[in-house]
Amino acid sequence: MEQKHILHLYWRAGFGLKPKELIDLSKYSREQIVDDLFEKSKDIVPLEKDLSYFDYYTSKDVRNDKKKRQELNQKDRENTKILNTIWLKRIATTKRVLRERMTLFWANHFVCKDTPTRHVLAYNTILRTHALGNFREFVKAISKEPSMIRFLNLSQNRKNSPNENFSRELLELFTLGEGNYSEKDIKECARAFTGYHYNFEGGFRFIQLWHDYNEKTFLGKSGNFDGDDIIDIILEQKQCARYICEKVYSYFVNEELDEDNVRKMTDIFYQDYNIEGLMRFVFMSDWFYEKKNIGTKIKSPVDLIVGIQRIVPVYFTKNNELFRLQSLLDQYLLFPPNVAGWKGGKNWITTNSLMLRIKLPSMLLEKESYSYQYKGNLKNLKVVTVKNKYQEKLTVYVDWKTYKENVKKLSLKVLTNTLVLCDINGGTKQYISSFGKRPSKKNLVKLMSLPEYQMC
Amino acid sequence: MKRREFIRNSSLATSALLIPNFLKVFENADPSKIGHKKLVIVHLKGGNDGLNTIVPVTNDIYYRSRPKIGIKKSNTLKLNDELGFNENLKPLKELYDKGYLSIINNVGYPNPSRSHFTSSEIWQTASDHENILDTGWVGRYLDHYGKKPYNAIHVDDHLSLALRGASLNGIAVKNSRQLYMSLQESDFNEILSHYSKDHLTEHNLGYLYQTMIDAKSSAKYLYDTALRSKLSNNYPKNSILANQLKVIGQFINSRLDTSVYYASLSGFDTHSAQKSRHNKLLTDYSEALLTFVEDLKLNNTFKDTLILTFTEFGRRVKQNYSDGTDHGAANNLFIVGNNLKRAGLYNLPADLKDLDDNGDLKYEIDFREVYATIIDKWLNVDDRRILNRSFSKLNFI
């Protein structure tokens, strides 16, 4: 398989490749490489987070004792932030890249934010469990997760006082897309989801007393529907398959939808709502590897950070710096901005975020950095090298030894081809050629500072 | 790099070299440009307790609801027979006495959110609670009327949602030098000096290069233009808000082509042991504000500046068991300016007998009516294009 295509696949389905991995893979066929990608992601391994602090609290304590409640809340807040670092580390180091990529995708589809760490962890586990599974089971599982029940007020949705928040988002954001249902459908849907609740430890609880057992009419069908029935009815609509395929296409292939390709995907997905089948179809299709799809996506902040870490292992030693970095770059994992999630694409880019993105490799990888400045007047211009005194450095440990092994005996050209997917502009090519031939630390930083490196 | 190429790429630098900036100061202050009228927005983050800010000193319900944290009449500065400023607001009262302050009571919106996050978002995007937009209201002002990112500046590291538009975002800077220095700290300039135009035709990559070019020109613009005025030395030290307003003062006094500035002060989420913390915050706020106004007056820019102070919600009338207050709903809001149409109390304070089901103040004025008034009467553009619908206008400017 062509190297550029492998790298494209690995950026969209994973988080890039090391130079030698790319070389190794290039002797295999597309089918072999795609098979291998799925094979490696077969196992479902939840994030590992110690939750023993929670053992000291009982539901009674928390209900009756305000102090204890606040204490647990505080601990949860801290621990959920720690879970963020655990997840980032997982993304940066896992071999099951496709599952991780899919988990990230679904986290921005079934968007949810919550504080209790046990719930957040369980939610993340559900995302990775179903990430390549069956979409029907996935939606049903999501509707019963405590974090979701809390986030979209399902527990306040009761027979005599329905709360439509979850129903609206279920239809608008999770399954059908705006305009494919009526306001009446939302109301009826909410009635079917009455009685959903959760227990203190994190299990689903159905409270019969709160459930509306009367007949509902939803998307043209009538019956004594419960939540699962509603999800089945939604999935009967081909629009649901189409909506998901559009979202998959715009995330994995191109923001600009191609009618034909989306239709082909929809036909396949609608048959059984099998996510793995859909993704396999996408990665095996010739159109996935068309030039217009390669290197044309703006990396998310997570892609950028993790992509660097996968080339050079970088370990953050101060969690707060990692939190701040994520929030400055506008993607703080587990803390989405709203129920619609991160919009991605050009929305990642502001003047400030782009300047930080360009500076990031240097902040991470260089102890000292230099810049070129022009001195003198128009008649006598000189370029001088100046040491940067003020640049904020991140407190990280950089494993240069591993990097050196990774690029041993390789040229800068090979490194460039691994790092930059999009076409490099003539002027920039010239600039890169001035770097020399060695994949030195300095040159690595220079390559990663290019706007071309922001693309995948 | 070829010399010619260099000259082209650094044309910004060279033109600035040829004409010293201080000669251009007033030449640039063209009233028809965007940014002739300035709006400064101050967000008191966490939900300021409006009742302990402007105290209803004759209201029994207030004192009954707040046995431990209610503020005694003797500890207030008289506003009128029924109201007093928290005594830590002496500088604010000074502005009030001069007719520079308008207090708008009971500002809020229907179906109020009591989440900091959601309610801040509602205020920043000027949305209904039911349908929160993903662009900020200042961002949409930029979309329709802005030209450059620096037309709206947030004095911070991170750009507030309020200043994010669909096609144009504002810019976040902590001082005039920050962006410029930041450019020197990476290969940024080096990379830009090599780009050839064909970069810009590529869809997303072109957008990155275009943003870099804009960033460079914005950085240069801020660095050069802000030199026209110095940072004032009069501001209180070690005050987060004062530091931000000091920078905004420098920017405004330099006649920067910026129409909206954004600043914020955190810490108003006073759930427990509220009194001392709240007092300190009010002191910081009002001292910073007064110094800012004086700074502007000294430079003859106060007449063109309007300052809006808001907070995402008020606090519950009844105090809680930790001598603090929980999240509430409607609240008062401050407008500071030179030629206010209705200085002082804009409308009557809340009726504490008529609270909502949570025991919170009911809103009487939608905050978007305040925005619409400012957009229409101060920024002089069509508020409906920015707020996506028509709101009735108030009468404070």
Image (cartoon, rainbow, N blue to C red):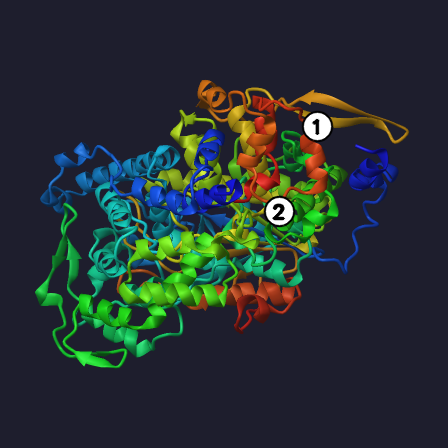
| Residue B315 left/right relative to A43 | right
| Circle on res. A434 | 1
Tell me the kind of residue under disc 1.
Ser
| Circle on res. B335 | none
Residue at label 2? B208
Q: Position of residue A130 (x, y in %)?
A: 26, 51
- Asked where in the image residue A37 lies, by quadrant, the reply is top left
Q: Is residue A180 above or below residue A117?
A: below
Q: Is residue A72 above or below residue B83?
A: above
Residue B316 shows in the view = no
> At 62% across and 47% down in the image, what residue appears?
B208
**Depth order, front residue of B78/A413:** A413
**Depth order, front residue of B12/B195:** B195
Mark 2: few/some/many CA within 10 Å (<14, 14-19, 20+)? many
- Asked where in the image residue A90 lies, by quadrant, the reply is top left
Residue B259 shows in the view = yes
Q: CA distance from mark 1 to mark 2?
A: 22 Å
Q: Is residue A163 above or below residue B33?
A: below
